[in-house]
Amino acid sequence: LAEQWGNLLDYCLQLGLIPEKDAIHVTWAHGANSLREMEEALRGPAMVLEADVTVEGLNTQNQTNVPIMAHPPAIYSDNTLQHWLNTVTQSQKGIKLDFKSLESLSPSLDILTAADSQNQINQPVWLNADILRGPNVPNFVQPVNFPTVTVSPGWLTLYVPLLAVKPYTQLMVEEMAALVRDLPQRITFPVRAVLLRASWLHFSWLLSQSPR
């Protein structure tokens, strides 16, 4: 997908959107899910649109295989991934898709692959899915691999303010390092900021595993 613009910083720099190759200058529109939110984000100054993907009617008798743009607990939306992608790819905005359900992954990748085969996508695409067990969460979902985008694999975490919670551990980051070690694409790690400080030594080790 968009291999000629695979690096988000290179893309923004080439378009003159940022003064130097530093991610601090990149601006984001989060939760650009509904038709209104998407259109507002497209008209706004944000360089990258982040949106959440699940399937229609998730975990109900009305569940379908149609990826929609919605953040839990919402399971219905006036916007599908297909329409969202058709609209956003007409702009120069970067794309980040945050998969909120395992069920949405396969049909969403089918849609992305079809769009790429039609040369529809000309901007960087990031795919985010929480694929490993993190602190305070007992379960995990299976790894996701899509080779031509920036992959943003994270940890399922739970944070409850005012309660004692565990930080990320060395074992957790070692599991992540083993998972992504041989992946050819660019990698980013989404981390719950409130847990980062207590876990920084582990993340410093994780970042040191790659010259990138």
Image (spheres, rainbow, N blue to C red):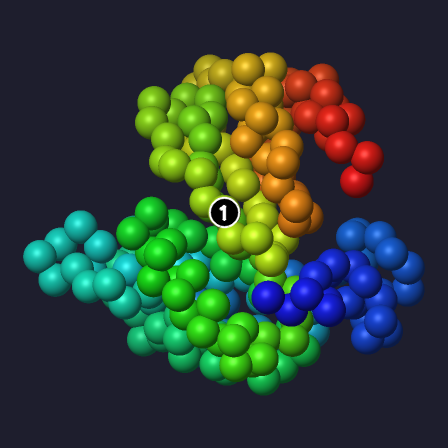
Q: How many marks?
A: 1
User: Label 1 neighbourhood size at 10 Å, few (<14), some (14-19), many (20+)?
Assistant: few
Expressed as whole percent of the image width and height from the top left, the position of residue 208 reads 77, 26
Q: Is residue 23 visible?
A: yes
Quadrant in the picture for residue 174: top right
Residue 93 image-quadrant placement: bottom right
Q: Position of residue 144 (x, y in %)?
A: 46, 44
Give the structural element (helix, strand or loop) at label 1.
loop
Horizontal side of residue 184 vs 142, given as left or right: right
- Seen from the viewer's position, the closer of residues 127 and 162 is 127
* Quadrant where the image shows the N terminus: bottom right
Q: Residue at x 57, y 53 (%)?
A: 147
Q: Which residue appears at 52% of the width and 81% of the height?
A: 118
Relative to residue 153, is residue 177 depicted above or below? above
Amino acid tagged 1: Asn
Quick one: which residue is furthest to the right in this view? 20
Q: Quadrant of the C terminus?
A: top right
Q: Give the image location of residue 146, x and y in percent.
A: 52, 53
Q: Going by the image, does 77 lie left or right of 180?
A: left
